[in-house]
């Protein structure tokens, strides 16, 4: 707790600071001021919890100083000191709700007791303030959620909650004009329980100079709604500054979309702003991270149609191993999709599903095992729906296409039995009961012959290949922050996570936990 001593007599200040063991009273920082003006500056700088002040000082007396301190720090506790029996000063001290009024010459025991009482009172005030703020935050969260529903169904609830929320401010004109902001992050991104309150406080501190007010809520997992209010109309300059502060707040998270609705007047029209933000957010997938989407911005973006029969053209070119043709199709696809608000996410994901499926089929037809296994249909669908941004989905297609042509140009025709064995392992490595017998039966070989053929063709035993493949997949899975070490262990076919950790460390030189921490930094 912080204490400010304001007195124009240096001997008094020195005596107080050196003669009392302040730490015994819960005071860990003590500041000094020689008059009211300096005391006010010190209060602004250090925000003391208790002020022990002389009444009569040059430039600004203690009463005037404490009136001004109350304006910037209303919870500060006051103790007055004076060598004068002045009833007017005493009345002023009572009006300021001073904890005590100590006469000079000072009694150190009386001063200590006054400070102890002030400290107890301050803690009570802070606890009361916290409880009040908690109740207010709960009401604000309820109001923020209710405002995302059509007004005709919750009109009375909005009025009741807004009245309760505004009691702290003594006026309801904070809701004169409003605009809604929606921020969306990947559902797999984990936040602490109090993270929304922290973000709201940070944003509130940023926009305080703009005289804006915020209430917020988490509409669903990692979908945050901020209603921003102003006692005057929103101007273009205010909205531009608001966008800048939002980017500053969320940029460290990298993966996020955000949209701002149209400004409205009156609390009962906020749903219109929210709806506009929701519509704008539907196009966020196709834009770069951190792009602020507003109805005005999107109305100026050209809208384009997807070329017809693109999947058929891609499949035909791929079958002919025509890399120039597939590259042109991919470039045309990106040009059609990127920053195109007229497209539906599901439509584009479905198209990419077909392209990845064509790649997988060509790998099977050409017996190209490579690093990318021929995925089943459900795996392909999950693969295309995983990406939070369009650019990442498209880049994955480009990488897979380049890998396909690289394998096609560098690999020799693989023994058909070996291809079948690898392909089966790549699709069933997650089964902890996967056996040599099961694998060899798929390749229509006896277990012993399958092991011999595989070792002769690859230089590895079948079990060595299975173990290595599982651990390579584990490395890929550990790069995804959604996956835990124990979860990865199960996904790659290990029932015993301890055994998995030992095998992983033997293969990579480090434990899976250390590997994951390094990759996610």
Image (cartoon, helix red, strand yellow):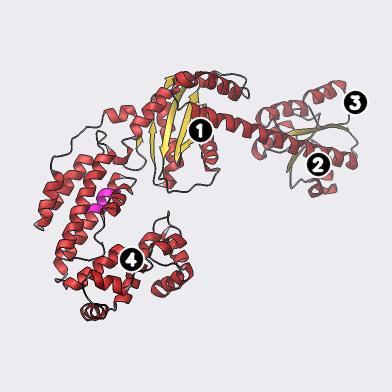
Residue 367: quadrant of the picture: bottom left
The disc, 1 or 3, on the residue closer to the chain's N-terminal end is 3
Q: Are marks 4 and 1 in contact (CB under 8 Å)?
A: no
Q: Which residue is mark 2?
A: 13
> Residue at (27%, 37%) from the top-left corner?
344
User: Circle 3 sits in a helix, a strand or a loop, which is it?
Assistant: loop
Query: Which residue corresponds to the image point at 67% horizontal and 34% vertical from the top-left?
Result: 131
Q: Find residue 85 and name its label.
A: 3
User: Which-is-in-front pick, marks 2 and 4?
Assistant: 4
Q: Which residue is mark 1?
A: 216
Q: Residue at x 25, y 73 (%)?
A: 440
Classify 475 as above or below 228: below
Q: What is the count of numbered marks?
A: 4
> Which of marks 4 and 3 precedes in the sequence?
3
| Element at label 2 | helix
Principal secondary structure, stretch drawn in magenta: helix
Q: Tell me the CA gap for discs 1 and 3.
A: 53 Å
Residue at label 4?
A: 429
């Amino acid at each position: 707790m912080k204490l400010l001593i304001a007195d124009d007599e240096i001997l008094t200040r020195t005596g107080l600071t050196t003669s009392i063991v302040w730490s015994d009273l819960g005071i860990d920082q003590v500041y000094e001021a020689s008059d009211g003006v300096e005391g006010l500056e010190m209060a602004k700088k250090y925000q003391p919890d208790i002020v022990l002040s002389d009444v009569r000082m040059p430039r600004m007396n203690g009463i005037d100083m404490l009136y001004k301190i109350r304006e910037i720090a209303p919870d500060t506790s006051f103790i007055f000191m004076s060598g004068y029996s002045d009833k007017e000063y005493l009345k002023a001290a009572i009006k300021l709700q001073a904890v005590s009024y100590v006469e000079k010459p000072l009694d150190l025991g009386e001063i200590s007791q006054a400070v102890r009482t002030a400290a107890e009172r301050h803690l009570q005030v802070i606890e009361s303030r916290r409880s009040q703020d908690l109740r207010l935050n709960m009401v604000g969260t309820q109001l923020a959620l209710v405002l995302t529903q059509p007004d005709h169904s919750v009109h009375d609830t909005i009025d009741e909650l807004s009245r309760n929320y505004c009691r702290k401010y003594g006026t309801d004109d904070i809701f004169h004009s409003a605009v809604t902001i929606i921020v969306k992050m990947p559902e797999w991104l984990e936040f602490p329980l109090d993270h929304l309150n922290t973000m709201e406080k940070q944003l509130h501190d940023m926009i305080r100079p703009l005289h804006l007010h915020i209430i917020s809520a988490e509409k669903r997992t990692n979908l945050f709604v901020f209603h921003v209010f102003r006692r005057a109309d929103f101007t273009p300059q205010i909205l531009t500054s608001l966008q800048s502060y939002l980017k500053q707040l969320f940029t460290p998270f990298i993966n996020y979309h955000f949209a701002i609705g149209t400004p409205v007047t009156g609390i009962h029209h906020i749903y219109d702003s929210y709806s506009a933000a929701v519509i704008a957010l539907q196009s966020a997938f196709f834009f770069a991270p951190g792009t602020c989407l507003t109805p005005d911005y999107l109305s100026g973006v050209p809208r384009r149609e997807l070329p017809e029969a693109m999947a058929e053209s891609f499949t035909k070119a791929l079958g002919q191993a025509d890399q120039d043709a597939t590259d042109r199709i991919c470039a045309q696809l990106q040009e059609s999709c990127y920053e195109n608000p007229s497209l539906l996410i599901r439509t584009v994901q479905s198209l990419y599903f077909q392209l990845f499926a064509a790649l997988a089929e060509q790998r099977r037809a050409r017996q190209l095992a490579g690093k990318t296994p021929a995925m089943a249909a459900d795996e392909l669908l999950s693969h295309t729906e995983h990406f939070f941004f369009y650019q990442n989905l498209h880049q994955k297609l480009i990488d897979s296409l380049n890998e396909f042509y690289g394998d096609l140009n560098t690999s020799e025709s693989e023994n058909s039995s070996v291809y079948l064995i690898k392909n089966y392992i790549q699709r069933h490595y997650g089964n902890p009961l996967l056996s040599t017998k099961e694998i060899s039966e798929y390749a229509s070989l006896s277990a012993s012959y399958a092991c011999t053929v595989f070792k002769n063709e690859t230089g590895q035993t079948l079990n060595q290949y299975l173990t290595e493949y599982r651990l390579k997949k584990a490395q890929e899975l550990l790069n995804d922050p959604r996956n835990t070490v124990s979860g990865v262990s199960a996904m790659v076919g290990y029932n015993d996570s301890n055994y998995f950790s030992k095998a992983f460390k033997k293969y990579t030189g480090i434990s899976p936990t250390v590997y994951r921490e390094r990759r996610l930094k």
